[in-house]
Amino acid sequence: MTAQIIDGKRIASELRARVAGEVTRVKRDHELTPGLAVVLVGHDPASQVYVRSKHKQSQEAGMASFEHVLPENVAEADLLALVTRLNRDPLVHGILVQLPLPKTINTEAVINAIDPAKDVDGLHPSNAGRLAGGFAALSPCTPLGCIILSKSVHASLEGMNAIVIGRSNLVGRPLVQLLLNENATVTIAHSRSRDLKHLSARADLVYAAVGRREMVRADWIKPGATVIDVGINRLSSADGKTRLVGDVAFAEVAAVAGAITPVPGGVGQMTVACLLVNTLRAACAIAGLPKPG
Ligand code: NDP
């Protein structure tokens, strides 16, 4: 068997086009221009790439994009003051502070300072709590992307056995909550889980969000299962170039699975597209408009 390759690039591009259409509509009908503010502290190269891509894609979707670059040694109080200003700015509907922050800054304090209504990364405890309680919330973008990719294969996830490997606040935990909202039966695994291979081999849906290259092997996968690989691991090759690989041993797992996301070209493509979705949703909610389609 050869798995269907889930084309994250195409699905993300269709999602961005839908968001752009909705942005045109709310601008025309309600004079509302959704605005996204991204804050970058320091000059981590990977973070710079992510921030550039967020800026470009939000502009392409017709949104207002505000970029704030602060020096590596910025005082925590100054960063908090910027977040407070953005909270009050009526042109800003989404605030994203690019992580990781320098060690001198208390990340939790910064996340807590963001207005939950503008928390498009879905990391504020208020949004995490609402999601866990099954209430409407802004949810983290990568898990949202995982659900959309899964539903590109299965119209409904109801009753399916899912395993989420990884329990971070950014990916694993919110993904579990979103899967529960879809009525899947969910196992959450982590570094202390026993017999991961057997837990995984029972699942119809396997989500790998660990950060260990090619950890998930063919014999972890039930034939025909859908495998969503969140992992991004950078490998340097002898010629000095960097190559990205996921948490799943792609070639061998693709021979067993029913459907699989590639790395790159899978989940990574969806994260920024879902950030645009969240910014549009936040803008509509703040303006008192119905949730966009
Ligand atoms: P974290 O490091 O925050 O969390 C990793 C999780 O994996 C932890 O829960 C940890 O368990 C678990 N883990 C570690 N080792 C093992 C193991 N041997 N067996 C089982 N579980 C293990 O990472 P993130 O959640 O932030 O990211 C995970 C991966 O996803 C990374 O590769 C990251 O680059 C990628 N990523 C990709 C994104 C995208 O857009 N595609 C966005 C965000 C992340 P424990 O809790 O017990 O320590």
Image (cartoon, grey):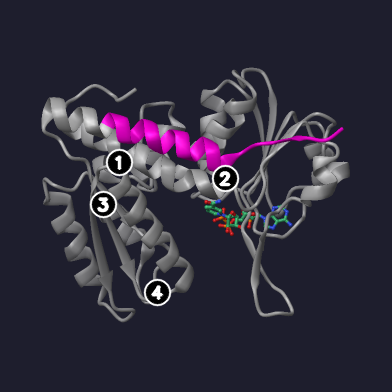
What residue sits right under mark 4 in the picture? 102
Give the spatial CA distance, label 1 vs label 4. Answer: 25 Å
Q: Residue at x 86, y 44 (%)?
A: 218
Look at the numbered disc 2 and say if its residue's Cβ is closer than 8 Å to ligand 1: yes
Residue 217 seen in this snapshot? no
User: Which is more N-terminal, label 4 or label 3?
Assistant: 4
Query: Does residue 135 appear left or right of residue 173 in this picture?
Result: left
**Mark 2 and 4 residues: CB-CB less than 8 Å, in contact?**
no
Residue 9 seen in this snapshot? yes
User: Which is more N-terminal, label 4 or label 1?
Assistant: 4
Q: Could you classify mark 1 by the number of other residues whose Cα lies within 10 Å: few (under 14), some (14-19), or many (20 or more)? A: many
Q: Quadrant of the C terminus?
A: top left
Q: Could you classify mark 3 by the number of other residues whose Cα lies within 10 Å: few (under 14), some (14-19), or many (20 or more)? A: many
What is the secondary structure assignment of the residue under circle 4? loop
Q: Could you classify mark 2 by the number of other residues whose Cα lies within 10 Å: few (under 14), some (14-19), or many (20 or more)? A: many
User: Which is more N-terminal, label 2 or label 3?
Assistant: 3
Please state which amino acid type lies under the numbered disc 3. Answer: Ile
- Magenta residues (range): 1-22
The secondary structure making up most of the magenta span is: helix
What residue sits right under mark 3 in the picture? 114
Q: Which mark is residue 193?
A: none
What is the secondary structure assignment of the residue under circle 1? helix
What residue sits right under mark 2 in the picture? 267
